[in-house]
Structure formats: C-alpha cells, structure tokens
Amino acid sequence: MVSTSVRALTYAQAVNEAFHQEFERDPSVILMGEDVAGGAGRSEFEDAWGGVFKLTGGLIGKFGPERVRDTPISENGFVGAAVGAAATGLRPIADLMFVGFVGVCGDQIFNNMSKMHYMFGGKVKLPLTVITSTGAGVGSAAQHSETLYSIFVHFPGLKCVAPSNPYNAKGLHAAAIRDDDPVIVFNNKQLMGGVGGGIHVPEDSYVFPIGKADRPKEGTDITLIGISYTTYQCLKAAEILEQKGFSAEVIDLLSLSPLDEDAVLSSVKKTRNVIIVDEDYPMCSMASELSAIIAEQAFDFLDSPPIRLNAPHASVPYSPVLEAEYIPSPEKIAQAALSILE
Amino acid sequence: MTKSQSSIPKDTLMWMYETLVLIRRFEEQAKREADQGRILGTHSAIGEEATPTGICAHLRDDDYVLGNHRSHHHCIAKGVDINEMMAELLGKATGTNKGKGGTMHIADATKGMLGANGVVGSNIPVATGCALSAKVQGKDNVSVVFFGDGASSQGSLHESMNLASIWNLPVLFVCENNRYAESTPFEYAVAGQSVANRAAGYGMPGVTVDGQNVIEVYEVAGEAVERARRGEGPTLIEAMTYRYHGHFGADNPRGYRTAEEQKYYEDKDCILYMEQFLIESGVATKERLEEIDNDAKAKVIKATQFAIDSPYPDPSELLSDVYIKYP
Ligand SMILES: Cc1ncc(C[n+]2csc(CCOP(=O)(O)OP(=O)(O)O)c2C)c(N)n1
Ligand SMILES: [Mg+2]
C-alpha cells in the first residue's frame, strides 16, 4: 500500500515513539536497564547506545538521567527496584534485554511482581512494565534466542503481550505503561530487526487495548493463530495456501494474558480447522493452552483436531542449518494446513 | 629484569608468547569471518590475551576453566583445539560443540574448559561448584572463572565468593576489567571503583594486576593457584585490561570512549611488551619470535580451511543431546 498518507515506521521507531509520548504524558514514568542510554556518566557520550535494540534512544537527552537510568548488570537488583518503585508512586519500565535473563531475576518477577497486589489484599498496586526480547533466527544460540511466553503467562498477576508489527507495538507499549498491573512485553528480535516493518503508524499517541487479538486476514477454510513473529509467518503461509486454492484466516493473538478467547473461538467456529503457531518450547506452551481452550469450548465445531506447531522440545541450536529447522516456517505451516484441507 | 621474572622457566615464557600470538591471530580471523558476514559476530578478545595466558600457564588439563561471552582467549589458553573452535564458529559438525553452541558456548571438557557462557555472571557459581567437587573428592585440581567488570555487579559473584570463602574452596575468581560493559563505563557501574577490594568483605585475598603484562599476571596467578592447591582457599584477581574492538560484531567503540584512551592501552599491548621482554632478557631472538608469529598465522589459516571444509550438522542433530536418555 503506497500512499502519501503512509507514515512508515520500523518496529523500533514505533516503540521509541511510544516511550517518548508516555514519558511526556506522565512524569512518574521512569526507565531502567543496561545501556538503555549508554555511555553512562559521560556527558560527551550520552545516549551512546539507546538500547541494544534501539528502542530507548533519545529519552535521556529529553528526560534526563534521573528518569532514564543505565544500570549495572544486576537484573535481580533493578527489576526488583522497579517493583519497589512501582509500589510507591512511580510507573517504571524495566528492560530485561533477553528473555532468558529471567533466570537471573525470576525471584523478583515471580515471587514479588506477580503476587504483591493479591497477597496484600489488593492494597498495593504495581503499575510497571517489563520489556524483553524473544526469538530465534539470528544465530544467537541457546541462551539468547528463547521465547518463554508460557513461563510468564503461567503466573496469575502478570499481564503479557506480544506485538507483531510497528502499529500494534506502539499501541501495546503505551497500554502496558498506562496499565495499573505489571505487564510483560515480548519484542521479537526479527521484528525489531526490520521484518514486517515500514507500515503506517499514526503520529498521535494511542493505545492498543490489552486483552484484544487482531484479525489481519479473513478467511474461511482454516484459522492460523500467530503470536508476534509467527503471525508474520502465518500471513506468509496464508499466501501459499491461497495459491493452492484455500482461504486461511489469520488471528494475531497479541495479548497472551488476558487471552481474547472470543476472537479465537469465533474464528475457529467459522473455519472449523485451526493451527496454532508458537515459537516457544512445545510443552505447556501458549499453543497447548489455546488448543485446550478450543477443544473444550469449540469441540463440536471442529472438522479436525487442533494442531500445535511449536519449536521442537530442544534448546535453540547455533548452527544456521539447525536453526533454520527450528522455527516454524511458512512452508511448514502451509504443509500442516494442507494435511488437513486436502 | 627482576629476580622473579628470571625464575620463570624459558619453556613457560615461550609458551606464553606463543599463546598470546595464537589468540591474537585467531581473533583477527574470527573478526574477518564476522566482517564478511559468514557469522553473526563475536565478542573479540583482542587486547585481552594476557590474563588467561598468564593464569593458564599454571594450570593442568584436569584443572577447570569457565568463561563468559568473551571467551575465545580463555579456550585457547586452556588448550582447546583451534580447528574445532573455528569449526564451531562456522556452525559445523566438527566444532567443539558439534555446531550447537557457537561463539558464546565453546566447551571442551577433555581440556578442562567447561564452557563459555552467554549469561553474564552465570558461570561463577558453576566454577565454585567445580572447586567444591575437587575438594569433596580429595583432588588437588583448581577451578578458575573469568568474568568481566560488568559481571562483578551480579549477585552470583557475591554469593559465590561467600560460599567459596566459608568452604575454603580452590577457586580463582578472575575479573578481566576492560573498563566497559557494553557501552557502560566501569567507573559508573562499580561502586568503590575496585572489584578487588570486594574480596576483603568475604575474607579472601583480592589482588589487582596489570592485565596487559603477562609476566605480572603469571606471578600473581602462581601464588593464587598454589594457595588453592594447598587447600588454603579462594582468591579474587582483578586484571586491568582493554578490548581494542567494539563489544560485539560491528559495534563501534568510538561512540562511548576516546581514541586517546584506546591508544594508551594499545601502546601497552601485551604482545609488544612480551616481545621486548623476551628479546631484552635474551630468551629469544626477534627472528625466532617472527617464526612463532608466522606459525600462528599458518595454524589459523589451517583451522579456517578445516572449518570451511567441514560438513554442517545433519538436521537430525536438532533433537539429539537434549537428554542422555528420554523417555
Ligand atoms: C545476565 C545478562 N545480562 C545482560 C547481558 C547482555 N550483555 C552481554 S555482555 C554484556 C557486558 C558484559 O560486560 P563485562 O562483564 O564487563 O564483560 P566484557 O564484555 O567487557 O568482556 C552485557 C550487558 C547478558 N548476556 N547477560
Ligand atoms: Mg568489561
């Protein structure tokens, strides 16, 4: 779609714009993380990095080092500090650079962040956001390529969202920051690297509601449910299926907790077939959860059992030939669909 | 030349020189592989060769070394085969990790190299456990963990130093302080401006050493390794060093540090220093050192060819090694 009214932004630019607007809107918003600005303490090198994925550049120059804080490498320390700051009047954003680093700060996320509001009888609120990066496909091997949605979704008390393009990324980051509950935002590395970017993003501030799925493509024969990068893969698979004469509907989950069950169920009831495409490890995954919900609530509508397409039950390999096999590809998705439809 | 310097055996001096040069040439090639887009990138150890070299000069194959994300130099100093390392970088089946680990996870247990590690601070407790194992089994091996100035802010270091001290474990905590964690300067991130000073709080010796000077590193490490072998407990060593290149891949360090600062360290280059030392002390001639360098270059060319000629892993490898037996 080429038109003069298109304001094409990359994923990183869109998220960066959301941060600038939320910092502007609300002086209680602060940011902590490693190299979120960079060159810390040296005025001549201020903002040297602007975040590893360039999401947080420009903030320190505008809002200052009191609100935009580079941290030492101490995830348990600064994620825990975000909990304390949120409990006492601030609206912190903590940048957990790669989702696997939850291994370092799991105590704060699972034992405090998810539970304080409940344990304290609803009397303390934690309006904080954790942003983190997910996904394989860039040669980063086992510890830097995980997805791990279901670990977070498992915990009552955490909201979890996974944007799929610059437009919803901007709106979901704004919504996460404004939300009074802790929200985890999963940003896929391939999307941040430019895949699926360059779409229209309105300049004015807006929120994309947490708890709502999107339907980027309508169809009649099968529902493909994607999450973040796999939505992009599903859209590609839908093109392949189109060529073979089948009409796939794509549901972009976006919100993992709370889940938009209505969007999922109404699509599946219409198409009567479903594949859930999830880059996370397969056991106890989002795909498992969705498949259970569909089986429980739409069983009578189904022409075929729900199919889960996950990464395999293995850590992410380094070698490019193995990694290429790891992520569900459009071809594999299409193949799975054809195995039902043909 | 001081008395202690002259007491270092000639073979050891020459091994250290060969190791410094081999690391440098390997890392230059690894950088070329990344610059030409054949691999995503690596964390270059150029400039930081002396610390693991001076320390590993005291270690046996059955001593343990554990590293971090920037670990090619640890691996080479511990004797890991550079053919297999280069193959690993290229994701080949003949790599140290069969192509499954890559640059941040190189490991070779047969050489006592129990792994690089991509999670900052993550290997420090593991190294402490290796030392515990040696002690409980009544062996005299020691365990050495290398980590950066950035990693010194992780709780894992502090918990491990305390454990190692109360249990008197044979472990060396070696901080390679290259002044930066990504773009974050050491003086911003480390309260008190010293990692070594933190040892005092855990009742162990803490030593600062010039990490560009392999002889000094060798001497400090010698004492620490002997102490550990005698069962007298852990030591924290802070080696002051510098990485000449960016943090990772194409990162340009000019964004957060000055050319003058870099030049100060490059002028103190560990290889230049050692060349001068060996020639002036009459241990080797300039010609001999050139031969060693040419030899290192040839080994790296051979390793690269080996890696290029090696096959990729079979796709079935994706599902092997997850468990030993399953179900
Ligand atoms: C737990 C964790 N947090 C953050 C990172 C991202 N990261 C990789 S290397 C690095 C800097 C490490 O600095 P330092 O320990 O000084 O080692 P150097 O890179 O200087 O050798 C960071 C922040 C990581 N890999 N693991
Ligand atoms: Mg460092």
Image: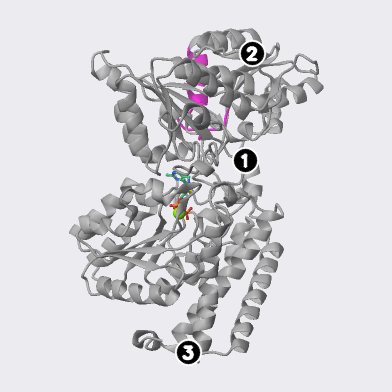
Q: Nearer the viewer, mark 1 or mark 3?
A: 3
Which amino acid, mark 3?
A: Ser
Q: Mark 1: which amino acid?
A: Gly
Residue drawn at x 23%, y 66% as measured from the top left: B233
Quadrant containing ligand 2 reads: bottom left
- A265 up-or-down from B45: above or below: above
Residue sitting at 40 percent across and 44 percent down? Answer: A73
The C terminus of chain B - image quarter: top left
Which residue is label 2 attached to? A215
Residue plotted at (76% across, 18% down): A246
Q: Which residue is mark 3?
A: B281
Per the image, label 1 sits on a secondary structure element best described as loop
Q: Which residue was labeled with disc 1? A: A137
Residue B280 rendering spot, x and y as whole percentages: 50, 88
Secondary structure beneath disc 3? loop
Check if residue A295 falls in the magenta segment: yes
Q: Which residues are magenta?
A: A278-296
| Mark 3 belongs to chain | B
Q: Earlier in the sequence, mark 2 or mark 1?
A: 1
Is B189 or B313 nearer to us in this picture?
B189
Q: Rate crowding at label 2 as few (under 14), some (14 to 19) or many (20 or more) other CA atoms within 10 Å.
A: some
In which quadrant of the rendered image does the N terminus of chain B lie? bottom left
| Percent of width and height locating residue B97 | 54, 58
> How far from the left and from the top, in percent, is residue A272?
63, 12
Of residues A308 and B24, the one drawn nearer to the viewer in this rendering? B24
Mark 1 surroundings within 10 Å by alpha-carbon count, few (fewer than 14), some (14 through 19), many (20 or more): some
Q: Could you tell me how far apart the alpha carbons at marks 3 and 2 are, in whole angstroms?
A: 75 Å
Tag 2 secondary structure: strand
Asked if residue B83 can be seen in this view, the reply is no
Residue B50 place in picture, x, y as percent? 47, 70
Q: CA distance from mark 2 to mark 1?
A: 25 Å
